[in-house]
Image: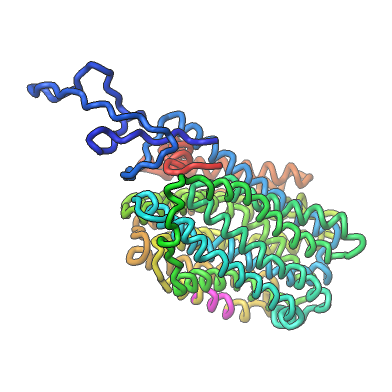
Amino acid sequence: MTVTPPPLPRADGRTPLPHPTGTPAATPAGQAHQAAPGTPPTPPPATAPQRAPTAPSSEPTPTDHLTPVSRRFLARAALVTAALSVAGALLGLVRDQALARLFGAGRDTDAFLVAWTLPEFAATLLIEDGLAFALVPAFSVALARRARGGPGDPVRALLAATLPRLALAFTATGAALMAGAPYLVRALAPGLPDPALAADCARLTATCVLSFGLAGYCSALLRAHRRFTAPAAIYVAYNAGIVTAMPLLGGRFGVRAAAVGVAAGGCLMVVAQLPSVVRELRRRSAGEAAGEAGGAQPMAPALLASVLLFALCRQSQVLVERYLGSALPAGAISHLNYAQKVAQIPMTLSVMLCTVTFPVVARALADGDTERARGRVERDVAMATCLVLLGTATVVACARPIVELLFQRGAFTARDTAATAGVMRVYALGLLGQTLVGVLVRAYFSAHRVTWYPVAAMAAGIAATCWLGAATVGPWGVRGIAAANACGITVTAVLLLAGAGARGVPVRARSVLRRLPRPLTAAAAATPAGAFAASRPESAVAAAAVGAATVAGVFALLCLALDTQGRAPALVRSSVRTVTRRFAHGRTR
């Protein structure tokens, strides 16, 4: 599928202005342009020779004006991307359900979850946050340089300068983790009942360093080119590998089958993107192929170090949880894991929109359009905040029926359901902080400049998590660990919002804070209403459905009622248009 190309340049070398409806204004042949009253009509300009739609323009247009047909196409592409992301999240739930049904919430599952720390870290460092924060802006700058013309192809040059070195680093790191698996397990969870099983699983999951690294590189390249479908499909492939491996190999290898699935799923993530990557790299003329090495500009090591350290600090919250949970009775780490996976779904869906707009913000900054970048980030914050607060209210109100519906079968007992639901309610209190961190940090790194402020903010949050976790794990157990996580990430969110005006995209903190009271009040009122509604039905399905519907209805009504300036109706009416605008400068394949 291709997108209708932007309008051709006019004969005088300027970009044609769009019609207010979005369609370029056209002047019929043989007629004069409309002029102001009292001004003699201006003769029509000479017709420029038509070029093939795929030929690159020597003068880049400042903005991409799309026809209504292209906008409809981009809306369909956004729907496909969202559908794939939701499908990946649902397969993740199926994966967790299979893990709970086959292996329960005991010592074997705890051992695998300690080994699963590696793919969780690798996903954050190499796919979702760290590497993407460095590569997407780098490829956006290369694409802007390509559009301005000149010798060589900066995109190919960047690829040649970075991919071989990164692949070598991924391979060496994975091999080192395999060799040191027993020591790693002992450091992550010193009180684990079965460290040998965890080490076996860790050797298998360590293969994800290479596969996730290559998958993250491909995703960053495609997103910078505004191809979103293949990157959105990678978690479908990943979870499909795990879900397939566990029932096939579980009888023979036990919980090690889940680790085999992680290794297979990582390879499938790369395979799912390779056709799109090959097609995109071939999409250039023969003239662009000449002298491509001259445009090589490798990423600054300090930039790569800053984004990776931020991602490492953020994911180290999991290390704190696993370390503190290893001293609790068997099953504590499993309860934390299941609660976290379910509670994070609203945050994942909220930040998904920002993942799509991140390359657009990076390209706007590469083109020098700071105002457009700021407006897009502030809209992202407003929409993500509203969505995650609605999800938080739903998770807190319907925690027990949700967990019972998803996990209570096989080796996962009613006692596990009660423990997981209690942890999930506490963990959900940090979802707003998690979402704000995920949105705001993109405003810092999209400028392709070295900044250490996000690392310092995340380190402060981790310090708060460690201190509070150590203080509360004794009296409150696993719920104290979840509370420390929520408080720590909230500290980081406050620091990132406070420093956003002076670094990266100049987000206006006061404007963001002025929009928070309405959805916060609506969520606070919708939560007890949903909890009361969910307590009435006997079955888990009915309780979850009634509770979620009540939360959504109360939340929407209160948002409208509390909006004295009429902004909420406008937000609702513009939600569909916003999805389209997020792709207004993009393409998909």
Is the magenta region chiefly helix, strand or loop? helix
461 in the magenta segment: yes
Residue 307: image location, x then y, percent: 49, 69
**Is 80 placed left or right of 102 in the picture?**
left
Q: Residue at x 70, y 59 (%)?
A: 266
**Is 375 placed left or right of 244 in the picture?**
left
Residue farthest left in this picture:
38
Q: Nearer the viewer, residue 172 or 318?
A: 172
Per the rendered image, the range of residues in magenta is 460-467
Q: Residue at x 46, y 43 (%)?
A: 586
Q: Is residue 498 above or below residue 585?
A: below
Q: Residue at x 47, y 46 (%)?
A: 284
Q: Quadrant of the C terminus?
A: top right
Q: Quadrant of the N terminus?
A: top right
Is residue 446 in view from this perspective? Answer: yes
Q: Residue at x 39, y 52 (%)?
A: 146
Q: Nearer the viewer, residue 337 or 423?
A: 337
